[in-house]
Amino acid sequence: RLLGRQYDGDEVVYLDNDRDSVYICGNHIYRHKVLRINYTTYDLRRSQDSVNPRTHPDIMLLSHDSESHPYWYARVIGIFHVDIIHTGPHSISPNKQRVDFLWIRWFGRDLTYAAGWKAQRLHRVGFLDAEQSGAFGFLDPAVVLRGVHMMPGFACGTTNEYLHPPRSVARMPLNEVTDWQYYYVGMFVDRDMAMRFMGGGVGHKATNAFTGALAHEARNNGSNIDDNGHSEDPELEPDYIIPDSDDEEEDLVDGYTSSESDPEDGNGALELGEDSDEDIGGEDGEEPWEIDDVQAEGFDAL
């Protein structure tokens, strides 16, 4: 940021001379409890997300990879700012500047798991191994799109393989010694979030160029499902079954559904036809038939 470079997701290596040109005022780093992210919703309204490392720590930002999925995900460990003075030939201001930054732990998307609109499954992510380069990093809050809701994959259980030692400041709360092995990205927490995964939102003009693949997938997500609800791809077979018309026959009579049942068992559905003499009373909000005003009103004049 001090050099005017745009964030592209790559970690830049700086030399000692570059570091010496940055003076931290008073050798103080200030920590904050909450980050508030202002954003424009899909219908051009203003809204705000609150990110708290203790309670709502997960965020999403635009991906800078060539893969089709347009977002990266991370967990905020800390929120900080520092006052600095940048000197040297590349300095653009001799004055004291405030620099805000986030300390984050990256999620990695599970590429072995079929997810998205075509697969009819939520995207699944998991923490990177702490021994892996790039598992942690620092981020400009300005590149954060929104806070995101991560749902633990309870069926997959927990693991302590990604972070050592077990008790770490990067794992909240501090008494936790394991991480969930997988998390599912909450695509449907609200309408704006759903539109971020569908693409084409009027208020998302700045990011629509990145979500073109999602928009195409969302609008053609039923192409692999036949009329009977079966997938042409066996790996994407839905978890529900649409019964064939021969399996369960129902007769529609004047807009009502009737099923054949023994009238003595008391469980038969009400059958109404054109010749039915059953007294079903007045319509909703209307008075029943064949009653006087006193019965209808519930009171009479004194």
Image (spheres, rainbow, N blue to C red):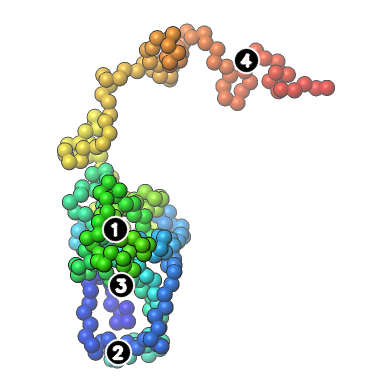
Amino acid type, callout 2: Ser
Q: Quadrant of the N terminus?
A: bottom left
Q: Which mark is residue 80?
A: none
- Pair 2/4: label in front: 2
Q: Is residue 178 left or right of residue 272?
A: left
The residue at 25%/56% (across/down) is 159
Quadrant in the picture for residue 96: bottom left
Q: Which mark is residue 179?
A: 1
Q: Quadrant of the C terminus?
A: top right
Q: Which residue is under mark 4? A: 289
CA–CA distance in space, label 4 to label 3: 74 Å
* Mark closest to the chain's N terminus, 4 or 1: 1
Name above or below for residue 65 compared with residue 21. Answer: above
Classify mark 4: residues with Cα within 10 Å, few (<14), some (14-19) or many (20+). few
CA–CA distance in space, label 3 to label 1: 21 Å
CA–CA distance in space, label 2 to label 4: 90 Å
Name above or below for residue 114 compared with residue 94. Answer: above
Q: Which residue is under mark 3? A: 138
Classify mark 1: residues with Cα within 10 Å, few (<14), some (14-19) or many (20+). many
Amino acid type, callout 3: Phe
Name above or below for residue 137 compared with residue 205. Answer: below
- Pair 3/1: label in front: 1
- Pair 2/3: label in front: 3
Q: Which residue is under mark 2? A: 21
Amino acid type, callout 1: Asp
